């Protein structure tokens, strides 16, 4: 979506955005009672202007991002998502919301070009494994701001350029983040609220649109999950994201969305359709600025499939630990590996470790 109006005052959104890009911010936060803040490598820093915003200034800066229809919708719903492009530099994903009676917003900066798998630290061996997944369900998970969308975009872009057989890729996003052009594959990107009513509606329609690969921005509800499973069962490759922090928690989250009486059936369906999970989090780099992703990787083999079906998901970490030759790794091992490479600090690493014994060993170093 483009912007149609800009605030003409000392605080101008067109001055704020270039500074955010220049300073390497991942997010811009606009809220009354604070200066405009930039999220730079996980920490908040004020915009150089430093002015504490009044409710009117916060509202005007936020409304300056909305066209007339978006503003009308926001005033009804009190929340709104959109995206827009600033000249040729960057795209922004925006959430406008109301807090304590005033309007605020958060802008996420998105590069115009999709980063390659090398740029985001995905090993080539993992990419080759992912290329072998032709159908089923593949998930990328992690907390908010962990780079899930970037990882998925890099994966889809690689398929678009390198898939041995041209495929039809449909994405259903809220909003569209990375814009992709058809290369070896045909890509159609649909935005919730503009091109389709909801994730579930768009996903159901994709089953009638000759899609080979379907990306659903997020599996937020039971209806979307159920249609995603159906799509995966019928020979499509379905890619999606969840806000979970490990492979095991991801599987349990999907199952727990359903009523108890349906969970046995869902376990069986998931055991047959789930192909892999990448769970990731971002760590601050030891030297210089920036962050690096630590990734837990699960590929569903016969043992994992049986564990899902038999409600023994708690045993999956044992398979991941023993599955390094298959490209699998636990989050704790990925974190410790970053430390051993000298990329992250122990004090940043230790609070994130799930295994108390590993944390104790790191504390003694």
Image: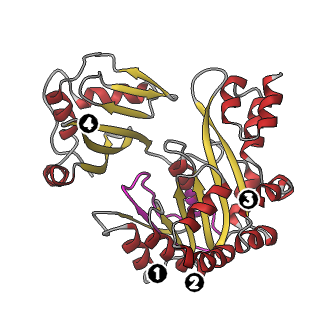
For the residues bearing labels 2 and 4, Cβ distance under 8 angstroms: no
Describe the element under mark 1 as helix, strand or loop: loop
Residue behind mark 4: 104
Residue behind mark 2: 234
Camera sees residue 235: no
Front position among marks 2 and 4: 4
Residue 23 position in % (x across, y down): 44, 24
Residue behind mark 3: 314
Circle 3 residues within 10 Å: few <14, some 14–19, many ≥20: few
Figure check: 358 above or below 138: above
Label located before the other in sequence (2 or 4) = 4
- At x 15%, y 49%, the residue is 75
Q: CA distance from mark 2 to mark 4?
A: 43 Å
Asked whether residue 171 is drawn in magenta, I would say yes
Label located before the other in sequence (1 or 2) = 1
Label located before the other in sequence (2 or 3) = 2
Circle 1 residues within 10 Å: few <14, some 14–19, many ≥20: some
Label located before the other in sequence (1 or 4) = 4
Describe the element under mark 2 as helix, strand or loop: loop
Residues rendered magenta in the picture: 156-183
Describe the element under mark 3 as helix, strand or loop: helix
Front position among marks 2 and 3: 3
- At x 68%, y 63%, the residue is 276
Residue behind mark 1: 207
Residue 222 position in % (x across, y down): 46, 70
Camera sees residue 51: yes
């Amino acid at each position: 979506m483009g912007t149609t109006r800009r605030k003409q005052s000392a605080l101008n959104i067109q001055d704020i955005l270039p500074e955010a890009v220049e300073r390497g911010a991942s997010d811009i936060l606009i809220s009354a009672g604070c200066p405009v803040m930039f999220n730079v490598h996980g920490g908040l820093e004020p915009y150089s202007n430093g002015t504490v915003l009044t409710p009117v200034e916060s509202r005007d800066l936020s409304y300056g991002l909305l066209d007339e229809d978006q503003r009308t919708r926001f005033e009804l719903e009190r929340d709104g998502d959109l995206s827009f492009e600033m000249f040729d530099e960057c795209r922004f994903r925006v959430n406008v919301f109301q807090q304590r009676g005033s309007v605020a917003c958060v802008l996420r900066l998105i590069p115009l070009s999709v980063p390659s798998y090398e740029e985001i630290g995905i090993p080539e061996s993992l990419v080759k494994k992912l290329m072998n997944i032709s159908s089923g369900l593949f998930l990328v998970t992690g907390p908010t701001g962990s780079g899930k969308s970037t990882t998925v975009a890099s994966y889809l872009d690689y398929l678009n350029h390198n898939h041995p057989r041209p495929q039809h890729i449909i994405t259903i996003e809220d909003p569209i983040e990375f814009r992709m052009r058809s290369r070896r594959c045909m890509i159609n990107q649909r935005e919730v609220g503009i091109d389709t009513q909801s994730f579930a509606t768009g996903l159901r329609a994709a089953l009638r649109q000759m899609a080979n690969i379907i990306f659903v921005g997020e599996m937020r509800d039971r209806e979307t999950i159920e249609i995603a499973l159906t799509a995966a069962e019928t020979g499509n490759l379905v890619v999606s994201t969840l806000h979970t922090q490990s492979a095991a928690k991801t599987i349990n989250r999907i199952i727990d969305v359903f009523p108890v009486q349906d969970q046995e059936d869902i376990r069986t369906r998931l055991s047959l359709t789930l192909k892999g999970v990448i769970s990731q989090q971002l760590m601050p780099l030891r030297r210089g600025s920036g962050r690096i992703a630590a990734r837990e990787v699960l590929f569903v083999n016969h043992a994992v499939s049986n564990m899902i079906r038999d409600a023994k998901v708690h045993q999956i970490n044992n398979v991941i630990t023993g599955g390094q030759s298959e490209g699998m790794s636990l989050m704790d091992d990925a974190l410790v590996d970053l430390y051993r490479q000298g990329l992250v600090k122990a004090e940043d690493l230790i609070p994130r470790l799930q295994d108390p014994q590993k944390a104790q060993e790191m504390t003694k170093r």
